[in-house]
Image: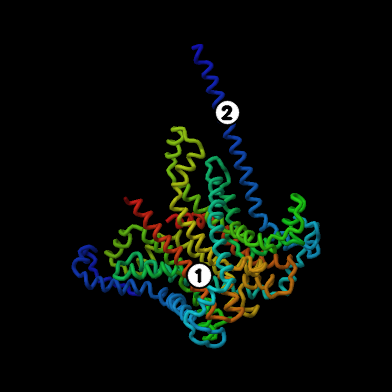
């Protein structure tokens, strides 16, 4: 008895110490996380703040994080400098059309490459995987010349058509389709369902998360793309918002005040950020799932 | 799209396969190809054809507005003896070799922070940290160009106040410009890899950690012997994806430095753009494209070899 009391006290002490250490680690983790998160989103906050800062106040030294007054002038000035409504519409049409058709064609191809067993499938798949390695830049010159010879520069058709299928999307969807149980479509096949119906009513609904990821990546990639719309458009009214924005700053523009550029940056980023906030949970989960495959 | 199957409903799929294997296999080729056809047509015209066409163009002196003459491998010879090409090559390789591990380390660090069981609000932090990945490189570049501007930016100001650095111009100085672009790209992209790492971490069996703790392994040992090996497949994906992606650096360079100062940030892709669409030298730019293509293929082959080895280890 007399011996067990000190051990019990010691044990208690150890437990408390472990608990204290755990608390310190937890507080430290929170501190690190909050600090790092602030640092990471700081540049985005600066875009937001500067877009509402009077031009004069962005040019003062020392620079301030929070200006002494706010204004909407940058936005009115932006609307005078570039056809922002038209460019937003161009971007929605470009990114939207490409995404809808590409995801459809990609998933059709992925179905053919995963659920139908035919001779030459492996060969086709090999070619597609090799294609994935080809840098977009290496294809740009002949594609541009081809479209230019058809008079499709500065047109929706010209910018949309070459993107109607995407090897990365096909591959990602195929990896997902192949992991679905074979009984799924065999049962339907025995019931006499056609292949397209199996694809549309059985495989696609079972691959929602992969389809969501491919859709969002496609939309994001095209919305944010700079090089392709830059090459395929030469007039402000035919540009996408990202290319228009790039033209506003640095290259080929007389110096545009930072406040105005930031207003443009915010307008160009906002639609994607809004979409992201609505679907973020399933999107992030989908990326995680497709990424470790 | 064909919707007839030719299989009597009462018959099992297996029996049908045995019965008319030939018709079935022919039917499967037809169906398979018809599913792949739309994508295949697009890819043939805009990927397969241009891949071959670029090679033939690289053997000519074609310009953007007129046809040139066939010169064999002259463009390649000119390219490999040009000092500027080797600068671009070095920049591209440095960029890739520095970016891929950096983005992996940053992403893994954040994933480990977020993977703690006792942390609340993981979803919130994850969303915030993922945000730079959603915006375009154009927007990211604009934000950083303002923050780094030597005459207006907060970072040079803080550099002066905190460290006494006079006239800090990270993007305008030869020795720091490329590193700054790499840093900005890591900032923009790490969120994507973080999410993948998080999933990888959550896929590791928690019993392993418990067993290791009982055996007296400390936190570092557990990280080294359980976490890292558990993340190996994720590493493979992330590093290769990061490497291949970093051969294509364009937007940041275009907006932030135009390849300067003194070619310090000029990458191969940026050079292709200026040669083709600035100088109109399509033949020369095509040769550059093919060099880039071959560099990427080498990485791709390394990945395939690695993957095969890895899969064999898993099976064996």
Classify residue B23 as left or right of residue A198: left
- Which mark lies nearer to you, 1 or 2? 1
Residue B136 position within the rendered picture, expressed as x and y whole percent measured from the top left = 60, 64
In the figure, A82 relative to B99: above or below? below
Chain ID for label 1?
A: B
Q: Identify the residue shown where x is 52% and y is 82%.
A: A145
Q: Residues within 10 Å of mark 1 (few under 14, many from 20)?
A: many
Q: Nearer the viewer, residue B10 or B131?
A: B131
Quarter of the image for residue A263 reads bottom right
Q: Nearer the viewer, residue A14 or B69?
A: B69
Q: Residues within 10 Å of mark 2 (few under 14, many from 20)?
A: few
Residue A234 position within the rendered picture, expressed as x and y whole percent measured from the top left = 62, 80
Classify residue B128 as left or right of residue A81: left
Q: Which mark is residue A100?
A: none
**Which part of the image, by quadrant, shows the C terminus of chain A?**
bottom left
Chain ID for label 2?
A: A
Residue A220 position within the rendered picture, expressed as x and y whole percent measured from the top left = 55, 65
Q: Is residue A151 visible?
A: yes
Q: Identify the residue shown where x is 47% and y is 66%.
A: B296
- Which type of secondary structure does the marked residue at label 1 adopt? helix
Q: Which mark is residue B292?
A: 1
Q: Which mark is residue A17?
A: 2
Q: Nearer the viewer, residue B106 or B261?
A: B261
Q: Kindly give the residue lying farthest to the top in the view shown.
A: A2
């Amino acid at each position: 008895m007399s011996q067990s009391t000190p051990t019990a006290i010691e044990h208690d002490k150890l437990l408390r110490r472990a608990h204290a250490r755990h608390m310190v680690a937890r507080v430290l983790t929170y501190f690190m996380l909050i600090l790092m998160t602030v640092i990471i989103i700081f540049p985005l906050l600066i875009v937001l703040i500067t877009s509402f800062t009077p031009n004069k106040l962005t040019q003062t030294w020392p620079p301030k994080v929070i200006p002494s007054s706010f204004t909407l002038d940058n936005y009115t000035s932006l609307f005078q400098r570039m056809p922002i409504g038209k460019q937003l519409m161009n971007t929605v049409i470009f990114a939207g059309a490409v995404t809808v058709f590409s995801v459809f064609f990609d998933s059709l191809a992925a179905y053919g490459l995963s659920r139908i067993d035919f001779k030459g499938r492996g060969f086709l798949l090999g070619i597609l995987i090799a294609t994935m390695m080809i840098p977009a830049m290496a294809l740009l010159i002949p594609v541009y010349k081809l479209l230019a010879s058809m008079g499709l520069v500065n047109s929706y058709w010209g910018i949309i058509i070459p993107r109607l299928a995407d090897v990365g999307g096909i591959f990602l969807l195929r990896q997902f389709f192949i992991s679905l149980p074979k009984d799924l479509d065999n049962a339907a096949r025995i019931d006499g369902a056609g292949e397209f119906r199996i694809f549309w009513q059985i495989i696609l609904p079972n691959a929602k998360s992969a389809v969501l990821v491919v859709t969002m990546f496609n939309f994001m990639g095209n919305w944010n793309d700079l090089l392709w719309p830059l090459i395929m458009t030469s007039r402000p009214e035919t540009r996408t918002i990202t290319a228009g924005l790039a033209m506003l700053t640095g290259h080929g523009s007389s110096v545009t005040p930072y406040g105005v550029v930031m207003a443009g940056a915010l307008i160009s980023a906002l639609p994607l950020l809004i979409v992201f906030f609505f679907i973020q949970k399933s999107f992030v989960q989908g990326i995680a799932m497709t990424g470790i495959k | 799209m064909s919707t007839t199957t030719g299989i009597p409903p009462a018959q099992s799929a297996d029996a049908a396969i045995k019965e008319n294997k030939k018709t079935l296999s022919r039917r499967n080729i037809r169906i398979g190809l018809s599913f792949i056809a739309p994508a295949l047509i697009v890819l043939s015209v805009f990927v397969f054809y241009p891949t071959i066409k670029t090679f033939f163009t690289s053997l000519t002196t074609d310009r953007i507005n007129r046809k040139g003459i066939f010169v064999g491998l002259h463009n390649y010879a000119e390219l490999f003896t040009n000092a500027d090409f080797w600068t671009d090559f070095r920049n591209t390789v440095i960029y890739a070799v520095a970016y891929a591990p950096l983005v992996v380390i940053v992403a893994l660090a954040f994933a480990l922070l977020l993977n703690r069981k006792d942390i609340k609000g993981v979803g919130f932090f994850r969303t915030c940290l993922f945000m730079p990945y959603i915006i375009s490189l154009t927007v990211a570049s604009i934000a950083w160009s303002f923050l780094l501007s030597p005459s207006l930016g907060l970072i040079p100001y803080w550099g002066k106040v905190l460290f006494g650095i006079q006239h800090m111009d990270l993007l305008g100085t030869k020795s720091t410009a490329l590193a700054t672009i790499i840093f900005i790209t890591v900032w923009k992209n790490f969120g994507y890899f973080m999410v993948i790492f998080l999933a990888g971490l959550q896929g590791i069996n928690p019993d392993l950690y418990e067993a290791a703790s009982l055996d007296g392994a400390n936190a570092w040992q557990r990280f080294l012997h359980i976490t890292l090996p558990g993340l190996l497949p994720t590493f493979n994906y992330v590093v290769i994806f990061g490497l291949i992606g970093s051969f294509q650096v364009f937007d940041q360079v275009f907006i932030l430095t135009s390849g300067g100062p003194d070619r310090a940030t000029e990458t191969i892709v940026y050079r292709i753009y200026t040669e083709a669409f600035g100088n109109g030298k399509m033949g020369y730019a095509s040769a550059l494209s093919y060099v880039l293509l071959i560099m990427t293929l080498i990485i791709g082959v390394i990945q395939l070899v690695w993957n095969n080895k890895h899969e064999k280890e898993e099976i064996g």
